[in-house]
Amino acid sequence: MLAFLIVKLLVYYYLIDWTIYSLLYVIISAGIILSIAGYLAGISRKHKAVIFSIIYIGISVLMFADVMYFNYYNQTVSVAQLWQIKNVAKVPQSFVATFIPVSIFIFLDIPVVINFFKKYGKNCVKEHSIGKVRINRSRKYRYIRDIAFAAVFIFIAVNPVNSIIIANTTGEEFFVNHTADIYDNTVGRLTKKDIDEKEVMSIIDDNAPDADAAELKGIAQGRNVIMIQLEAFQNFLINASYNGVTLTPNLNELIKNDTIYFDNFYSNIGKGNTADAEFSALNSLYPVIEREIYTLYQDNTYDGLPWHLKRQGYSTFAVHGYEGDFWNRREAYGGQGIDKYYAMEDLDQSDIIGLGISDESVYTQAVDIMKKQTSPFFSFIVSLTNHHPFEMDENLKEIPIKEEDEDSKFANYLQTAHYTDTAIGVLIDKLKEEGLYDNSIIIFYGDHHGLNKDMDDNDVYMGRFLKKEYDYDEMLKVPLIIHIPGSGVTKTVSVVSGQIDIFPTIANLMDIEISDDEYILGQDAVNAKEGFVAFTAYMLRGSFVTDDMMYEISREEIFETGRAWNPKTGEEIPVEDARKYYEKAIALKTVSEQILEQDLIGGGN
């Protein structure tokens, strides 16, 4: 039994990133599981074998969930993610694609361990003829021992003294980690103190960039706004070729004329992935780590880009080729200032690729909706075909794959990403055909990465393609392309920016006034002198990127044990050099959480 248990734990800690403390974690976890078994074996309950079986199977399922979640998010699962199960169930292809075959070892020991308990545990309680007083004393000492153990365990898990030693040596142990998570999402939330509204605004002011310059102000004033969020579209695709084929010919052509291209633009999503990207882009607020904003803060008041445009007489609508209730969009979009939402069930579904309606069909139908608008409009389109696991019919694949890359996620990704660009060409042609092109500002940006560096050997394939190490500085980089036909403005902006900066950037280009007391955490990226983006998922709270530095906090969320490097050269930077930016990241993330938690945009609770 013990051998099977040890193998299970070794596999578990290996799959969630083996560290120098992992052997200690194995010992602690094994000790706790054996203690649970020993405790249940020592009681006289009739159904103790059933109770142990339920507990042990539950532990195994949670370990498996950790492995699956870590494989994608670089984090173990939280109780806050229980609400996202329905979303996972709706994209089974992606779920299956993240499965790691070796993780099956987490379940193989279950019948062995349970049978061992049934065989040897049922006879552990025996009658003793040693007198009532002694028995009571023995039970008393056992209770004291158990209470003392529980108290020490909870102290370690909660770590109220914020000890670096405790966090380092026990923070990622299975039971400690999940106990701490439960505490944070229950007691921790109840005892969390709100920051005064004036202090929130003070922190925003302290971190606000210099906004004196106003280059290109109003260059797109009064135009229709067509914003397209590109599913899983990474920046490395732009101006790149593979095996003699240009990957994004249509976007490349746009960049050459009347376009502002941001080539150091980053995704700053949370656990809501695509939904968090659009929320951040529309509102210039950071997402949270617990779950998608559209559900958690659905009833909040917002005043983002769609609301500002509505006050100028714009009609607003969104189009997406998937189910309307996914990520709670059907309920949330009204609060975002979007008047009408056209989801999969509202559109022609005759052309399906992968999860839903093809990008080409969605774009064509979106233009048909645009031409019916009687006023200036804001159109928000979410693409889908380039969604993980990047499945597409063979007749649509146009890129010849090298032998060394065959049957890889990397190869499949290149095919669907190339299709995404082809569909963009169709969109541009359709806009011109319907007379909508010349009087529009057209914004393309990626929502998040497609190729996780820790999955599917993507680091190997991408390292070979890029001819350098594939790290977060490349993985989290997505494009932002703002096309303004006839503007005569063609430039590349290399100052670091992110989805948090889209709203203030578009506001400047359209001469939308943003008052000093608005809750805006990003900056106008066209006029930014120094770039800064804080991260939420993949690289955890406290991580950030600037023009010359990227910092990843450790999984224990200890600043000193993080790592810093220059994203341009890959050279390591002393961690202490990152401290002031780390503190800025924490401050901005905290402020964003407070704005949402207190619903400050709506005037507070």
Image (cartoon, rainbow, N blue to C red):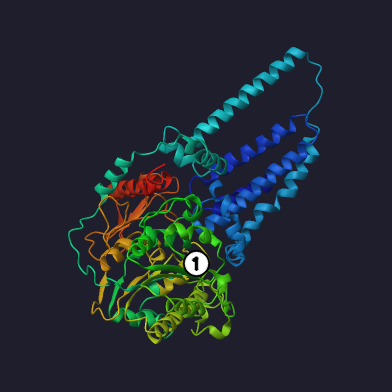
Secondary structure under tag 1 reads strand
Q: Relative to 236, is 364 on the left or the right? A: right
Q: In which quarter of the image is residue 523?
A: bottom left
Indicate the amino acid at tag 1: Tyr
Estimate the x, y position of residue 6 in percent, counting from the top left. 63, 46
Q: Is residue 325 above or below residue 291?
A: below
Estimate the x, y position of residue 12 in percent, counting from the top left. 59, 51
Estimate the x, y position of residue 226 in percent, counting from the top left. 38, 73
- Quarter of the image for the C terminus: give it: top left
Residue 120 seen in the figure: yes
Could you tell me which residue is drawn at 39 percent across and 50 percent down? 553
Q: Is residue 103 above or below residue 422?
A: above
Q: Relative to 150, is 441 on the left or the right? A: left
Q: Relative to 69, is 4 on the left or the right? A: right
Residue 551 seen in the figure: no
Q: Is residue 429 above or below residue 599?
A: below
Could you tell me which residue is drawn at 73 percent across and 43 percent down? 53
How dense is the environment of label 1, judged by Cα within 10 Å: few (below 14), some, or many (20 and up)?
many
- Quarter of the image for the N terminus: give it: top right
Residue named by callout 1: 341
- Of 540 and 453, the residue lying toward us: 540
Estimate the x, y position of residue 593 in percent, counting from the top left. 40, 47
- Of 99 and 300, the residue lying toward us: 300
Q: Quadrant of residue 514?
A: bottom left
